Amino acid sequence: MERDITEGVVSFGEWHTWYRIVGKSGSCAPLICLHGGPGSSHHYFARLEGLAATGRPVVVYDQVGCGASSRPSVEQLDVGVFVEELANLRERLGLQQAFVLGTSWGGMLAMEYALTQPEGLLGLVLNSTLVDAKTWADEAARLRDELPEEHATALRTGDIDDPAYQEADHVLNARHFCRLPDAVEIQRVLEARGKEVYRSMWGPNEWTMTGKLAGWDVRDRVHEIRVPVLLTAGRHDMCTPVIFKQLQDAFPAAPSLVFENSSHTPYLEEADAFIETLDAFCRSAELD
């Protein structure tokens, strides 16, 4: 079936943000999807565009520093810039009401954005994300150390140019990032990502926090978020049960769902079930 698709760029100060909208505006508020990284891209949300068939437009964009958006120097980027970019995107596109889905770093960004109390925000979907950066780094180190020793040892060296490191990183991601072999959407993310943004904001890898997000912790602030929240993760996720429990404790009233056959990308690995869950949550929130 042919889809109604709009692509373009909006100005963001001296930069620009690339966006894509699937579906027509109508009775359903759109869903804005925030990718992870920092410095990944919109590409792994491709299957989520199926939500548009329910009448709800899906909006994806590349955050500055990656994909088809501007690539400023990383020294210019911080959490506040990415929050401002999302607010600017909504204003420029005239999205007066919207739901926001954030995955991984995108979930962190979604919470920071919600804490600004933006008008017209109807709800948050927080997928495979975190409320405390240190716990994430600690759990990532644990997942690394549970790999076969040759792979764990290679990753501990931190030598990202070593073929042994790269092979071990592939094994780790195949277990805990995306369990779909050769998913074309993941390959497109890898081609479009901004590695410098990731290193500047987070660090050289998931278990080494040397970037601007080191020490990030919103557990004492999230009670200020006033919109409905849905929590999701995969059974084999980098968002481990320890991390997901922190999320559940932070949002005790929020429904939560673990996708049994997924890791960090249930919107890819179990797309149909994920879309069904999204549709039900958004419709329920609109009725409240």
Image (cartoon, grey):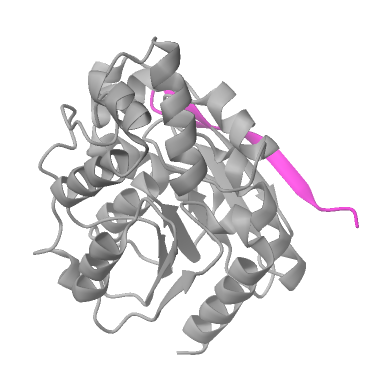
**Residue drawn where x is 39% and y is 10% of the image:** 161
Q: Residue furthest right?
A: 1
| The one of 20 and 184 positioned closer to us in this rendering | 184
| The one of 288 and 279 positioned closer to us in this rendering | 279
Q: Give the range drawn in magenta.
A: 1-17
Asked where in the image residue 230 lies, by quadrant, the reply is bottom left
What percent of the width, then of the height, locates residue 6? Answer: 72, 43
Please name the predominant secondary structure of the magenta segment in the image: strand
**Residue drawn where x is 89% and y is 53% of the image:** 2
Q: Residue furthest top?
A: 161
Q: Which residue lies furthest to the bottom in this view?
A: 288
Q: Is residue 195 visible?
A: yes
| The one of 92 and 187 positioned closer to us in this rendering | 187
**Residue drawn where x is 47% and y is 35% of the image:** 171
The total of numbered circles placed on residues is 0
What percent of the width, then of the height, locates residue 255? Answer: 39, 81
| Residue 13 part of the magenta segment | yes
**Residue drawn where x is 15% and y is 57% of the image:** 218
Q: Is residue 276 left or right of residue 238?
A: right
Q: Is residue 27 left or right of residue 260?
A: right
What percent of the width, then of the height, locates residue 273? Answer: 63, 71
Asked where in the image residue 225 lies, by quadrant, the reply is bottom left
What percent of the width, then of the height, locates residue 134? Answer: 14, 46
Q: In this view, does 134 lie above or below 150?
A: below
